[in-house]
Structure formats: C-alpha cells, structure tokens
Amino acid sequence: MYKLLSHNDLDGVGCGILAKLAFGKEVKVRYNSVSGLDREVAWFFENEKKDTFLFITDLSVNEENEKRLDAFHHSGGKVQLLDHHLTSVHFNDYEWGRVVVEDADGKLTSATSLFYEYLVAHQLMEPSVAVEEFVELVRQYDTWEWEKNDNHQAHRLNALFFLVSIEEFEEKMITRLKSSTHFDFSEFEEKILEMEENKIERYIGRKKREVVQTKVDGLYAGVVYAELYHSELGNELGKEYPHLDYIAILNMGGKRVGFRTIHDHIDVSEVAGKYGGGGHAKASGCSLVEEAYNKFVVETFHLEPLREDAKRNRYNVKRSMFGSFYKNRAEEIFLIYPLNECDWTIDHYKNHNGSDFFQF
Ligand SMILES: [Mn+2]
C-alpha cells in the first residue's frame, strides 16, 4: 500500500492525481493545509501498517515528525518527501528527502513536476504526453511562469480547480489523462472558465479601490480584505501599486493573512516568518496571531484607501520622462520627474497660489 499526504492546492492535488494514476486502488491520498499536515503524519504513525510507503509532497513536517520520519526510515520504513519550497531545503540532508527549488536547467520546479519525475524514474509510471502537458500546466501555474509565458491554459486549470470540488477535479483529470493523447479543456469548461475570468476581473477591480497602505518593519505593505483569488489579487495589486513592497491579504473568517509580492528583492516568506508562518519568496502566509492582527488590522483599519489611477490615462503615467502628477487627499499636488538617467525627484505644490489670470 501507498499513502500520499499532500497540499490542498492545485500543485498538491496534482501529486494526488499522479499517485492515483500510478497506483490506482493501492494508494490512499489525503490533502492537507500547511498547518494540518503534522496531525496527519502523527495519525500515520499511530494507525497505518508499517509496510505502507509514505509520500509527502508539496509540504514539510515539523521537527518532531522530522525525527519520527527519520527513525521510521532507519527501521526499514519506506518514506519519501518531495518539496520545492526554499524553507524546506534542509530535508535534503535525509536520504528520504528531496527538495528542489530550481532544476539543473534553471527551471523552477513544483511538487507535481518533482513527483512525476520521481514516478517515471522509478518506473512506477509510464511517461505520457497528456500527463506531461498537465504536469507542465500545474508547474507553470504554481511558479507563476504562466504569466511570463502568457500561458492562460495554466491559469485556467487553477480556475477550474476552484470551480469544482477536489474529488470532482481529481476524477475529471484522471479520466482525461487516462484516455486522451493531449490535455485539453472541454467546450463547456472553456465557456464557464471565460465567465469565471470576467468575474475575477470585476472582483479585482473592486479590490483595487480598497487597498490601504502601511509601513511594517521598514517595508511598505498594501493591505486588503479578501477571501478569494489571493494569487490573482496579489499579482494585480502589486502591479497596480508597484511602490508597495508586498500585498497583505486578510481573510478574517479564516483568521489568516497571505502575503504576495511581485518584487525580486522582497522575500515574503521572511515577512510571514515573523508571525510564525512561512511559504515561498513570492507567496506566503500565517495565522492572524495577535501581533499580525495589530499591525495589519488594528493599525490600518482607520486609513483611507490608496487613490486609484485615473482610468484610460494616457499622458500622466508612471515613469513618464515629462514627470507624473499626483494629488493627495488634501488636494496638494506632487510632481515626480527624472533628474537624469537614473535619479528621480519629487516637487510639492500647494494647492493654489492666490493669483488668477484671465488668459492662458
Ligand atoms: Mn507547490
């Protein structure tokens, strides 16, 4: 028997789909949140047969379970952890751990791509074009390479994942991957995905007008409340307000905060780490512990949202060589303009100088 414990996002479920394709009824799959995995690992030790092969993908365990897994491995137990998060690289010290963030060709990895590679290399699965295409879509979505490559199929796969239940998604994908030579969406899926994309666009448009700005530990954060579409929101808001170092997305019902950045010089796993969370350099999260609650909720709740740029603005644009005008809520005007090729400066104008002229 095999047991797979994986993350409950597209990349984690991608691993579950591969496991079911490879092992069929011989595998039990459980999807977990980042914080739920350790309980499942403890359950595994208490309840599963000792000869069950344990896979852990897209997630990593706490120190206690790390020791238990190593002891399990040394007593002849079969275990393999596959991950691509930078925060888990120390698992490479174990024979049963394999953490790769970037492969030999410099390509970013995902848990699904690592698991596929593992299954094929260990002859547990036959390579297939359709599966390879599916794996690549998951990888591109999980690493955000889809955006650079303009690969909307990858984005759509994730949208479909959220439109149906995990069970339904698994079943759909498994049937499709078993029977098709290429991975494609059905006509019906294409239509609902199009509707979903329009809905997301409207949702993000609304959220753009709700962002407040705060400074936390020397970094500028844009704070917004949202329960849905965190990746898309983090990315769009980051691009809309490029001066912000990162976006903090508050999910009050879930008592969590997600952090996203579009900037290479910012590592949001460090930001989340300050509040006991973790994740990637570009996407991370933590529970809304008291300190995070104070900084992101209490201290920002009274703030007014950032002003949105005028729509269809063609001339007064960011980084214009002629300068860009900004107006704050006190009606004061600022001009940001380049001094030379690399330096920028800002001038501050009071609202009115008192003189009027009847001609231009
Ligand atoms: Mn992943």
Image (spheres, helix red, strand yellow):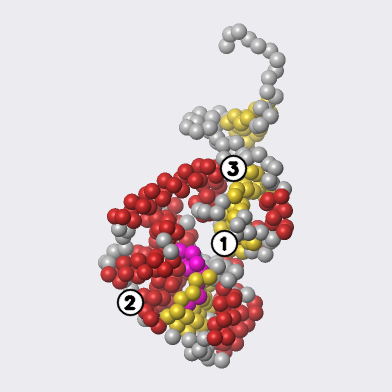
Task: Tell me the quadrant of the picture where the N terminus can be found.
Answer: bottom left
Q: Judging from the image, what secondary structure is the residue with disc 2 in?
A: loop
Q: Which residues are magenta?
A: 4-12
Give neighbour class at mark 1: few <14, some 14-19, many 20+ (Cα, 10 Å).
some
Distance from Cα at disc 2 to Cα at disc 3: 49 Å
Tell me the kind of residue under disc 2.
Answer: Glu
Q: Nearer the viewer, mark 2 or mark 3?
A: 3
Q: Residue 126, labelled with which disc? A: 2
Q: Is residue 271 above or below residue 356?
A: below
* Residue for badge 1: 280
Numbered disc 1: secondary structure: loop
Residue count near mark 2 (Cα–Cα under 10 Å), binned few <14, some 14–19, many ≥20: few
Total marks in image:
3
Q: Splitting the image into 4 quarters, where does residue 360 fall?
A: top right
Mark 3 surroundings within 10 Å by alpha-carbon count, few (fewer than 14), some (14 through 19), many (20 or more): some
- Residue 326, x across and y down, in percent: 61, 31
Disc 1 to disc 3, C-alpha distance:
25 Å
Who's the residue at 30% across and 58% down the image? 186
| First in residue order: circle 1 vs circle 3 | 3
Residue 118: % across, % down = 43, 76
**Residue 326 or residue 291, whichever sits in front:** 291
Tell me how far mark 2 sits from mark 1, CA to CA.
Answer: 31 Å
Tag 3: amino acid: Glu
Q: Which mark is residue 210?
A: 3
Amino acid on which disc 1 is placed:
His
Residue at the image position 51 percent from the left and 69 percent from the top: 7
> In screen coordinates, is 106 left or right of 216?
left
